[in-house]
Image: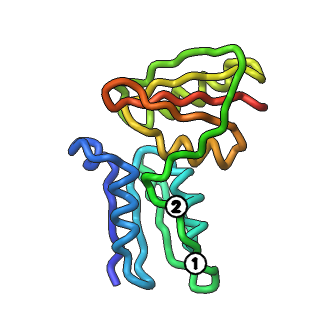
Amino acid sequence: MEPIVIEVKSLLKQGLGLFSAVMTAVDTLQPGQSLVVRSTFSPRPLISQMKRRGYTVRQEHASRMIITIFTPDVSAPMTEMPPSQECDTVVPVVGPEEFLDNRGFLPPEPMQRTWEALAAIPTGSVLVIHNDRVPIFLLGQLDEEGFPYEIIAGPDDSVIVKILKVK
């Protein structure tokens, strides 16, 4: 059975939501079918989500491209992933605030800028980011790394995320 191949660059050029497009493809996978994601960055949050769904992961590097191959692991139990719209992991965060405006940047730049800014602020501070959309991949990574965050609806469909630096 042929794998489903996703070209991240073409999705972004079409203006499609990356996470929702990938999850739509994942939901159409047939038993035993693999998913191949071609991108310029390693989709770490997607990797952890797919591992929870019972897939093994292999990456190949080819001329500034990272090819991530998700293959069903028949020996692993399949678990359901929360729906892609379920972004209400809200933990109140308080502390001195630093602001970062990520609006107008294309992925993966907002996530890279966020991690750089988070690394630069002192522990106990709150990084307040303003994004064009809910940063699903970032939220998965924050959960994985143990950073509390709060999501607030911003003006005109944008979103504000407050992240407490705990380490």
Q: Which type of secondary structure does the marked residue at label 2 adopt?
A: loop
Residue 77 lies, with reference to residue 116, above or below; the image says below
Residue 61 lies, with reference to residue 31, above or below; the image says above
**Cβ–Cβ below 8 Å for labels 2 and 1?**
no
Q: Nearer the viewer, mark 2 or mark 1?
A: 2
Residue density around tag 2, few if under 14, some if 14–19, many if 20 or more, within 10 Å = few
Q: For the N terminus, give its image quadrant.
A: bottom left
Q: Quadrant of residue 48?
A: bottom right
Q: Is residue 106 left or right of residue 74?
A: left
Give how far across and how far down residue 137 sits, in percent.
Answer: 50, 46
Q: For the C terminus, give its image quadrant.
A: top right
Q: Which residue, given by chain and number where applicable, does mark 2 sit on?
A: 82
Q: Which residue, given by chain and number where applicable, does mark 1 sit on?
A: 78
Residue positioned 31% across, 26% down in the render: 156
> What amino acid is labelled 1 in the image?
Met
In the foreground, 116 or 149: 149
Give how far across and how far down residue 113 sits, in percent.
Answer: 52, 26
> What amino acid is labelled 2 in the image?
Pro
Q: CA distance from mark 2 to mark 1?
A: 13 Å
